[in-house]
Image: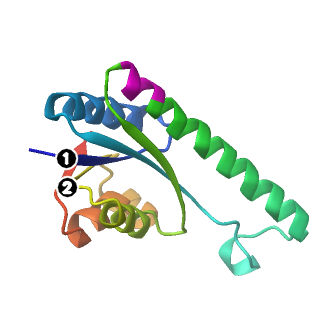
Amino acid sequence: MYQRILVATDGSKLSTKAVNSAIELAALAGAELIALKVIPRYPQSYFEGSVPLSAEDVARVEQKWSDDGRSVVDAVKAAGEAQGVKVKAILAKSDVVSDALIAAAKKHKADLIVMASHGRKGVKRLLLGSETQQVLTHSEIPVLVLR
């Protein structure tokens, strides 16, 4: 069935649902689970929404985001291993979550991507975009979407 399942997480309540389902599926399939948290880079210009900070402050902010991300994927690792699932916890640094997800799935030879979707519609979807939609339309790897 599945050998490696990649699950995207941001630590939110919604992504926890995807994580729990991915752990259960990995346990049933005897698959390895890859827990991924995508970390953004700090905006570099006013036009990207940046508040001017020194290089040291930017490094400190990015390190904080990285540390927070590490704790998120480490929690997934602990939950999976408690159920007998081998879990690889990884971070990816990117401004485009969907691209990072697809690239990580390819790199780690995942045969399934599991992720959550807010199910936004209309104007909210247009304004906020949909990383899930991007993954669904651009991934060559099957995607399981949970709501």
Q: Are marks 1 and 2 in contact (CB under 8 Å)?
A: yes
- Which of 70 and 108 lies nearest the eye of the viewer? 108
**Is 86 left, or right, of 112 in this rendering?**
right
Q: Amino acid at mark 1?
A: Gln
Can residue 133 be seen in this snapshot? yes
Q: Amino acid at mark 2?
A: Asp
Please say whether residue 56 is one of the residues in the magenta stretch.
no
Q: Which residue position is annotated with label 2?
A: 111
> Marks 1 and 2, Cα distance to the nearest angstrom?
7 Å
* Residue 95 in picture, x, y percent from top left: 54, 69
Name the element at disc 1: loop
* Residue 108 in picture, x, y percent from top left: 34, 59
Q: Which comes sooner in the sequence, label 1 or label 2?
A: 1
The quarter of the rendered structure image containing the N terminus is top left
**Applied colour scheme:** rainbow
Residue that extends furthest to the left in the rendered view of this protein: 1
Res. 15 image quadrant: top left
Image disc number at residue 3: 1
In this figure, what is the number of numbered marks? 2
The quarter of the rendered structure image containing the C terminus is top left
Residue at image x 29%, y 55%?
Answer: 121
**Is 47 left, or right, of 88 in this rendering?**
right
Residue at image x 75%, y 70%?
Answer: 50
